[in-house]
Image (tube, rainbow, N blue to C red):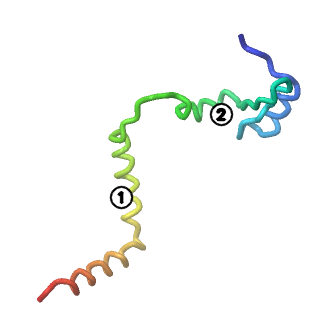
Amino acid sequence: MTPLLTDEQRQALEEVEERSPVTVVDPTTSRKYVLLSAALYERYRSLFENEEFDIRETYAAQDAAADAAWSHPDDAAYDRVATVQMSAATPR
């Protein structure tokens, strides 16, 4: 069964321009529901599915993010400070 949109629901979806969901209320039960476009649902679909998550699948992305974060030219000053601190801590 695929229920059809009411004019009020269609107008609400048009107002948010498919950027966010629309909350609808069942007037009989006062229960709230979320109405969203299929395109928006596809973007967030993985959040609703119960898939096994393996952290190892994210290692490549984590490495790339860390490399990008730590290789910024402005970070060279921190590298120099760390080198000076290590030199000062080394017994002679």
Q: Nearer the viewer, residue 26 or 54?
A: 26
Quadrant occupied by the C terminus: bottom left
Q: Mark 1 = which residue?
A: 67
State the residue at coordinates (33%, 41%).
Answer: 56
- Location of residue 80 in the rendering, given as x and y in whole percent from the top left corner: 31, 80
On the image, which quarter does residue 3 sit in? top right
Judged left or right of residue 6, residue 84 is left
Is 11 placed above or below 1 here? below
Q: Residue furthest bottom?
A: 92
Q: Mark 2 = which residue?
A: 40
State the residue at coordinates (58%, 35%).
Answer: 44
Q: Secondary structure at mark 2?
A: helix
On the image, which quarter does residue 76 sit in? bottom left
Is 77 placed above or below 42 here? below
Residue type for callout 2: Leu
- Location of residue 64 in the rendering, given as x and y in whole percent from the top left corner: 37, 52
Mark 1 against mark 2, which lies toward the viewer? 2
State the residue at coordinates (59%, 34%).
Answer: 43
Tell how many labels.
2
Q: Nearer the viewer, residue 6 or 19?
A: 6
Q: Residue furthest front?
A: 29
Mark 1 burial class by Cα count in 10 Å: few <14, some 14-19, many 20+: few
- Location of residue 50 in the rendering, given as x and y in whole percent from the top left corner: 48, 28
On the image, which quarter does residue 12 sit in? top right
Quadrant occupied by the N terminus: top right
Is 60 placed above or below 14 here? below
State the residue at coordinates (42%, 73%).
Answer: 74
Residue type for callout 1: Asp
Is 25 placed above or below 2 here? below
- Location of residue 48 in the rendering, given as x and y in whole percent from the top left corner: 56, 31
